[in-house]
């Protein structure tokens, strides 16, 4: 073989060997990491996975060595147990799922993968040393009262609002340390806290801080007693550790006239009605998708009298967007639907308390971090906040309900829509997301108000109308809710929604249990007497025929 032939052969062999050699190199983080984690956290652990643009909060960038949920001091790395806990339990109300099905060996493999992306874990001087979290002292109203004073003194209301609903004046312009717009946490919903809902969990975060965010450690700036007082105040905002989601709205009977001319008086009519709290999720099925709506829950009360039915719907919102407009049939550009256009403030970010953290700079006098706000803080949205109630156009006779995204051609829906910039209710007939027809001259009326981070909307309609369901006593009716947040440019199909729930119109008068109880007791008594007579007759001896007694 000539020298040229040998050179060609060696080149071919080298080319064939190169891929084989490359294939023997283990993938970054390991095969299990690439299979389960890389789609979000990226193949290189930098938080830039293929799904990252659609996620809020953004996936953790492991290369920075900054981890939020830890049992180590501010600025320190997490322990292996901290990482195991997050892998096992996930991060509630984010895209980070729990992995309870993994073996201990697999979890340890993922812990090693996460640590491999940051050189800090190999530095012996950065070895994490956990701190001890004491058992929580007994809760007291006095402690919570003092915690409220601490909350105000260190500047928490600027971001988190006066009563913790995430509606502070700085909230619309907040960004994280990576430059993403974020939302101040809603402190009234402990079940969304990503570090856990218990008092010890909250105390730990005050003590350790949240690395990579402006949430500082208060281990030195607040005494141990003050931190527990702050914990107790936050717990006092809402005592629930879980949301207690409902499936049913009980429509309470009232003899009062349901008049909306005096909204405050109208709200008093709902005082005795049972509240139902429903989860709100993003619409991810059809174009115009909203993967991460700002609202994660809606509270509903309902009443009716001989003529009308009314609903009180409340939910938390960072701000009242009433400068723009909205409608359920507004189109969403394809590039925005694909996540290629970032929304206004509050569209991205992530943090401990279940909504998101706060700004990039914060002093020790700032509770969760605070800033004066950015240019975005005063930006008015092109779109307003809005609400819709959805019912089947005709009451279903079987189990099948209309398609939950504005109905379908065979099973249309009746949509009660309120643009909260106008505070006027309109009705639409829906036969699908691309088939909405405005109904003129219908009788749905509404009043709305916004106070301290909460929208409150009352909608009223007569029990019987020219279109839609007729409401009657002791009746079940499917109902669903849609919420639009103008700050996130939600409109049309880009919205938060619930699945189909049910409402039940309670009987006007609850029958007394006395008569049914007496009737049941009488029947039981009669049955017992008959049984005794029958048994005695069977046991009485019968004299033989012809034998005298």
Image (cartoon, grey):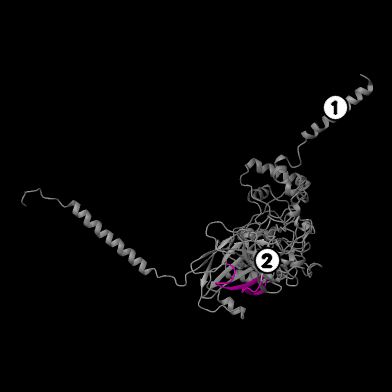
Farthest-out residue, bottom: 262
Mark 2 surroundings: few (<14), some (14-19) or many (≥20) residues within 10 A = few
The answer to which quarter of the image holds residue 421 is: bottom right
Asked if residue 16 is positioned above or below residue 250 in the image, the reply reads above
Q: Where is residue 500 in the image (x, y as percent from the top left)?
A: 59, 60
Can you see residue 186? no
Mark 1 surroundings: few (<14), some (14-19) or many (≥20) residues within 10 A = few
Q: In this view, does 302 lie to the left or right of 194?
A: left
Between disc 2 and disc 1, the foreground one is 2
Q: Residue at x 36, y 66 (%)?
A: 516
Q: Which of the numbered marks, if any, corresponds to residue 437?
A: 2
Farthest-out residue, right: 3
The answer to which quarter of the image holds residue 189 is: bottom right
Which stretch is magenta? 440-468
Q: Which of the numbered marks, if any, corresponds to residue 307?
A: none
Q: In this view, does 395 lie to the left or right of 202?
A: left
Q: Determine the secondary structure under disc 2.
A: strand
- Quick one: 163 or 138, which is closer to the camera? 163
Q: Determine the secondary structure under disc 1.
A: helix
Name which of mark 2 and mark 1 comes first in the sequence: 1
Asked if residue 31 is positioned above or below residue 165 in the image, the reply reads above
- Residue under circle 1? 13
**Is residue 467 highlighted in magenta?**
yes
Q: Where is residue 260 in the image (x, y as percent from the top left)?
A: 61, 78
- Quick one: 62 or 291, which is closer to the camera? 291
Can you see residue 435? yes
Q: Where is residue 484 in the image (x, y as percent from the top left)?
A: 69, 65
Q: Residue at x 83, y 29 (%)?
A: 16
Q: Where is residue 141 in the image (x, y as percent from the top left)?
A: 58, 70
């Amino acid at each position: 073989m000539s020298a040229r032939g040998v050179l060609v052969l060696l080149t071919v062999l080298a080319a064939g060997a190169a891929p084989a050699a490359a294939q023997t190199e283990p993938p970054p983080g390991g095969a299990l990491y690439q299979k389960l984690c890389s789609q979000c956290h990226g193949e290189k652990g930098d938080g830039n996975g293929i799904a990252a643009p659609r996620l809020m909060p953004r996936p953790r960038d492991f290369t920075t060595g900054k981890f939020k949920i830890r049992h180590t001091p501010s600025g320190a790395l997490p322990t292996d147990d901290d990482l195991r806990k997050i892998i096992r339990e996930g991060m509630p109300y984010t895209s980070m799922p729990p992995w309870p099905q993994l073996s201990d060996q697999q979890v340890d493999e993922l812990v090693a993968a996460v640590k491999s992306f940051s050189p800090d874990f190999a530095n012996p001087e950065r070895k994490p040393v956990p701190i001890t979290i004491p058992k929580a002292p007994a809760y007291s109203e006095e402690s919570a009262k003092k915690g409220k004073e601490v909350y105000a003194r260190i500047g928490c209301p600027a971001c988190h609002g006066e009563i913790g609903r995430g509606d502070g004046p700085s909230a619309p312009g907040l960004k994280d340390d990576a430059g993403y717009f974020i939302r101040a946490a809603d402190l009234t919903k402990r079940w969304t806290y990503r570090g856990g809902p218990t008092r010890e969990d909250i105390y730990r975060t005050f003590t350790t801080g949240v690395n990579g965010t402006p949430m500082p450690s208060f281990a030195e700036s607040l005494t141990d007693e003050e931190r527990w007082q702050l914990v107790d105040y936050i717990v006092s905002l809402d005592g629930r550790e879980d949301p207690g989601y409902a499936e049913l709205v009980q429509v309470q009977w009232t003899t009062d006239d349901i008049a909306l001319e005096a909204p405050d008086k109208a709200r008093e009519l709902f005082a005795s009605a049972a509240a139902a709290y429903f989860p709100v999720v993003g619409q991810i099925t059809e174009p115009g998708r909203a993967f991460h709506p700002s609202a994660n829950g809606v509270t509903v009360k309902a009443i009716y009298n001989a003529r009308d039915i009314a609903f009180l719907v409340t939910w938390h919102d960072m701000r009242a967007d009433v400068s723009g407009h909205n409608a359920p049939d507004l189109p969403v550009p394809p590039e925005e639907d694909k996540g290629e256009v970032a929304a206004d403030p509050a569209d991205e970010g992530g943090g401990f308390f279940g909504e998101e953290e706060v700004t990039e700079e914060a002093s020790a006098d700032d509770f969760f971090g605070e800033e004066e706000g950015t240019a975005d803080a005063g930006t008015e949205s092109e779109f307003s906040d809005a609400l819709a109630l959805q019912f089947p156009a005709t009451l279903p006779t079987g189990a099948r309900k209309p398609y939950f995204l504005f109905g379908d051609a065979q099973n249309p829906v009746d949509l009660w829509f309120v643009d909260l910039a106008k505070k006027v209710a309109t009705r639409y007939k829906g036969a699908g997301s691309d088939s909405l027809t405005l109904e003129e001259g219908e009788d749905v009326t509404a009043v709305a108000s916004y106070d301290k981070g909460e929208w409150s909307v009352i909608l009223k309609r007569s029990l019987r109308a020219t279109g839609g369901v007729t409401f009657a006593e002791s009746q079940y009716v499917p109902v669903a809710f849609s919420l639009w947040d103008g700050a996130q440019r939600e409109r049309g199909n880009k919205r938060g929604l619930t699945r189909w729930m049910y409402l039940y119109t309670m009987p006007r008068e609850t029958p007394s249990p006395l008569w049914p109880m007496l009737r049941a007791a009488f029947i039981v008594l009669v049955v017992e007497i008959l049984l005794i007579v029958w048994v005695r007759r069977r046991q009485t001896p019968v004299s033989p025929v012809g034998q005298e007694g």
